[in-house]
Image (tube, coloured by chain):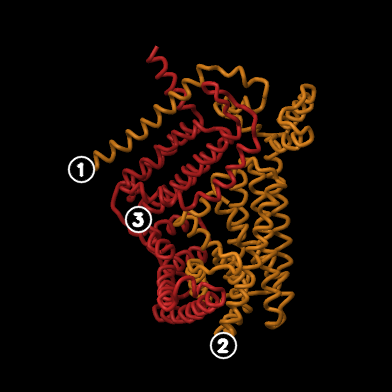
Chain colours: A red, B orange
Amino acid sequence: MKFDNEFFSLGYIDRLSYKETFIHNIDARVKLAISMMFIVCVVSFPKHVVLSLIPFFLFPVIFLTVGEIPLGFIVKRLVIVIPFVFFIAIFNPIFEKRVAFYIFNIPITYGILSFFSILIRFVLSVSMIILLVATTSFSGICYALRYFRVPEIFITQLLFLYRYIFVLSEEAMRMVRAKDMRSFGNKGTELKFYVKLTGTLLIRSILRAEKIYHAMLSRGFNGIMPYRKKRVFEKRDFLFLIVSMLFLYLFRFFDIIKFVGRIFVRGLS
Amino acid sequence: MADALISPEVGISFWALSLGGIAYSAKKLKDNMDDRLIPLMGVLGAFVFAAQMINFTIPATGSSGHLGGGMLLSILLGPYAAFIVMASILTIQALFFADGGLLALGCNIWNLGFYTSFIAYPFIYKTFTKRGKNLFIATLLSSIIGLQLGAFSVVLQTYFSGISELPFNTFVMLMQPIHLAIGIVEGLITAAIIRFAASVKPDILEAVYNLNNQTYTRSMKKVIGLFVILTFIVGGFLSWFASTNPDGLEWSVEKVYGKPELPEKEGGIIAKVKEIQEKLAILPDYTFKKAETKEAPAQEEESYPNIDVGTTVSGIAGSIMVILLLMGTGFLIKAFKKRAV
């Protein structure tokens, strides 16, 4: 059932993010900054570039293996979100038919090149995001956002949202289950039932917010969520940041593929 | 919008716009907010999430849909709070469901948050509803317009990024009708949910509206003016960047001639335009050494048959080697980890 899957995968990422590995222990600020730089580097290539994107897979590979994240989980996510990008990318070979070059007499058009380029960009950026959250606790990410001067109320919202998604999803799941058990086949998915179900959930949510507010007041809430003030920026965080930036720079501005290929070809002849 | 389809310029510009929107809304909320709104915002955001997981069948089509939530939040919370909640929902979606992307997050917040909260809500919803009247029409219209603007904005962002080859007109024709349908469904169910909630527990909704009215001051015109100016600045910035990328031009030329390659003599005009563009641009076509050598054939069409066979071979060999190297690294780390345990 789709509903349960969505819900459980969220909990699954949360559990993954509390592992203790080298990658998990790197400061969240470093990981967030590196992920952002990584995506900007990948995306900044001209659209027909395919091969130069390949070295960037080093980052997901390192995060995946060192962080002990199961590959199947990443692949599943990729498959779920690919349709939109694929739907847009598929038009490139159709609209752009100029031939770029021939490989063993098979013409390769610019459209085909950019199609593959988009797909690789997609896999790189999406896997990097999933690996970021799977190796970083959410409170860590919020801490990093706070450090980067994102407005306080927005971070408060993120923390609230993250906590109550679990609570309200469970509530919604119970309601859907109860409804499913009392209706057969496709019955009960009509609009009027949906409206009543969701409307009830809305009322319950608002009532719950009221209760939460009183609970917060009784614990001394004054408009700002308290948080642990300081996190130490250790030597290994700094090292990780520098090394990652070095690799990103190398991959972005030097043609690694051509370099390795030349060595290989020369070695053969 | 996804990371794979945007260029860094577009991504960063819309990050700036969205962060500006968040900062502005945060300031507005701080100035005159009831603390009660904080948990309400959080829980309603989570509600939208939970509601998105419930599906319904769309009458007559049999396909299933779910709630987008932007309009519902605006109606219940007012524009500033709704914008922030929408931004936080999209952030969580980008991070935990990999829906959208990190760089594209700015675009997504803008497309799904700004138009509903700051255009559809104050200008359409508010003018149509005077004290709960016309709820259905107001919600329907503002949902449709919010989504149409959002969809158009997706098209513009994709077009300016220049990664997709979809011609502007075709993309518009694809996106707008789909989002018209989505907007109608969204508007209808939003209105229905609110009316249902109001009929069951009128006092609760009334309390929520009171909270929101407290923070919602009708100074929207100033905000919009500010954002229009901002948009023009960003737009100018973008189009200036896009002009260094002659793809758009090539497209229109292609349409005129009806075939992909230009007659020989027209090359002169293109070359001249390119020359001017290169003079105007500070960063002409990302002049990074390596990228240039790769891009060069894309610019000069005559040169493609002369591509060196050697470079092709070393390119293929190189990629295979690098892929093997990467896989090797992965397996080595895994093996090492297993031994360490």
Residue A17 point in image, percent of width and height? 35, 55
Q: Amino acid at mark 1?
A: Ala
Seen at 56% across and 38% down, the residue is A115
Seen in the image, is A137 located left or right of residue B169? left
Query: Are the two marked residues, 1 and 3, in contact with CB atoms closer than 8 angstroms?
Result: no
Of B75 and B27, which appears nearest the observer?
B75
Q: CA distance from mark 1 to mark 3?
A: 21 Å
Q: Residues within 10 Å of mark 2 (few under 14, many from 20)?
A: few
* Image position of A115 with respect to A170: above or below: above
* Image position of B80 with respect to B108: above or below: below
The residue beneath circle 3 is A17
**Parent chain of label 3:** A
Seen in the image, is B39 located left or right of residue A139? right
The extreme front residue here reads: A185
Q: CA distance from mark 3 to mark 2?
A: 42 Å
Q: Quadrant of residue B220?
A: bottom right
Q: CA distance from mark 1 to mark 2?
A: 62 Å
Q: Which type of secondary structure does the marked residue at label 2 adopt?
A: helix
Same chain assignment for discs 1 and 2: yes
The residue beneath circle 2 is B203
The residue beneath circle 1 is B340
Residue B141 point in image, percent of width and height? 70, 69
User: Does residue A252 appear anywhere in the picture?
Assistant: yes
Q: Residues within 10 Å of mark 1 (few under 14, many from 20)?
A: few
If the image is split into quadrants, where does the C terminus of chain A sit?
top left
Residue B125 point in image, percent of width and height? 70, 73
Seen in the image, is B301 located left or right of residue A193? right
* Image position of B99 with respect to B194: above or below: above
**Parent chain of label 2:** B
Q: How many marks?
A: 3
Q: Amino acid at mark 2?
A: Asp
